[in-house]
Amino acid sequence: MVMNVRTLCLGILSLREATGYEIKKMVEKGVFSHFIDASFGSIYPALAQMLKEGLVRVRVEDDDSGRPPRKVYQITEQGRRALREALNTDPAPDKFKSEFLFQMLFMERIDPAHLAVIYDAYLEEQEAELRTLEEEAREMPAHPGARFVQDYGRAMLGTAISFLKEKRAEMMRAFAEVGGSGQRPDEEAPCCGEERKHPEEEERA
Amino acid sequence: MVMNVRTLCLGILSLREATGYEIKKMVEKGVFSHFIDASFGSIYPALAQMLKEGLVRVRVEDDDSGRPPRKVYQITEQGRRALREALNTDPAPDKFKSEFLFQMLFMERIDPAHLAVIYDAYLEEQEAELRTLEEEAREMPAHPGARFVQDYGRAMLGTAISFLKEKRAEMMRAFAEVGGSGQRPDEEAPCCGEERKHPEEEERA
DNA sequence: GTTTGCATGTAAACGGTTACATGATTGG
DNA sequence: CCAATCATGTAACCGTTTACATGCAAAC
């Protein structure tokens, strides 16, 4: 599937007309925010290009108030066709990038105090996102697609939060036992099952 | 946090020595694969650069068999410091990109038959990932960090699978009711709560 | 006999982010 | 008084992907 800022804008514009600024807002919180990214630097050029190509139309609202005129974009029939085409192909596999999980993977090398901080911050973040989602779902009855995605998000965030809460104590206990200060020595545990063929040449600090 | 291919390589090399090729394999399946991406085109240059900078060391194994010599990389003390530094900063928020969820958001615009196909394919994919993870966890007792991430992955995938199975019937039923063929008309439901200030100028195909 | 695995690397292209430029208005 | 909101847009930069180049050996 051709999933880029263009398609994203088309998708949003298929639900309602909007300015570039509004699209940005919708992307940074709300249903979209959980699985999509886009900044002004990509939205504005995308809209401009699609205008040239006839996938969108624009209506300029100039309230002479000094600030730039609102450019309200609308999808055209051609744009709808393009969206439909994109939607009716196979989706690429999900991409999930998590610095937090990367850090958890190497938790032994992190200062325990700092670990606790980032852990709790992450947990709070997930809880905040769940609240946002729940609020959003409460105040407006969404169409089936949005319903589905909201429910999915709620299920996933709920699981993440439960997991994090459950494991927190266990994790911190493990660290308290090992040592109150600093990091643990490197290279204490092999990980990936693959036997090292060259145990010689081990480095000494 | 500075989470890029460099840091990723350092992380892996802090657990065991490896070639660029091996790093690629570890990244495309296994614990890392769930929240990280990297291709040859980024791994090889990253290793070369870090070699220049002294963050890694290399041992060349030339079995003259025609194929390029194995370059086994090892992390240096300097590299460990760099990794530790990266690890001890705040993580950037997760990034989750899902074309599937985007498609679900606009499910009304997708051909029901195709929708069923991509839905089932996605479900199967999640199940396959869970199996991989479970297998991996069974055959090797991981260090605490890897344990944590595996458990997290299992919890999340489990929830996703249950959700998808649960909702499948309900979803398909809804579509069967509406109409057996083709897509539904566009613009049937407003979504995002924001009132449209300009209900005029509605387009007619 | 074709595909897969092993194994390295480069260069161009891509998609996107960040920072900048501009400026009035409203709220803390 | 400063920050945020509204509102557009450009240009430089960045990390990464994709495609290419090379080639043997083993498995299917």
Image: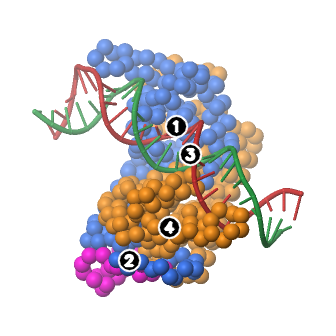
Chain colours: A blue, B orange, C red, D green
Q: Which residue is mark 1?
A: A5
Reply above or below: B1 against B132.
above
Give, as a single range, the part of the protein colored magenta. Answer: A162-190
- Gap in angstroms between the C-alphas marked 4 and 2: 19 Å
**Amino acid type for the residue under numbered disc 3:** Phe
The disc placed on residue A186 is: 2
- Gap in angstroms between the C-alphas marked 4 and 1: 41 Å
Q: Considering only order in the chain, which callout, 1 or 2, is on the residue closer to the N terminus?
A: 1
Q: Which residue is mark 4?
A: B58
Apparent side of residue B74 relative to residue D2 in the rendered image (left or right): right
Q: Could you tell me which chain the residue with mark 2 belongs to? A: A
Q: Considering only order in the chain, which callout, 3 or 4, is on the residue closer to the N terminus?
A: 4
**In this orientation, which residue lies closer to the viewer: A35 or B205?**
A35
Q: Residue furthest bottom?
A: A177
Q: Residues within 10 Å of mark 3 (few under 14, many from 20)?
A: many
The quarter of the image holding the N terminus of chain B is: bottom left
Residue B178 makes an appearance in the image: no
Marks 2 and 1 share the same chain: yes
Q: Are marks 4 and 2 in contact (CB under 8 Å)?
A: no
**Amino acid type for the residue under numbered disc 4:** Val
Q: What residue is at 52 percent from the left and 34 percent from the top?
A: A9
Apparent side of residue A29 relative to residue B180 in the rendered image (left or right): left
Mark 4 against mark 1, which lies toward the viewer? 4
Q: Secondary structure at mark 4?
A: strand
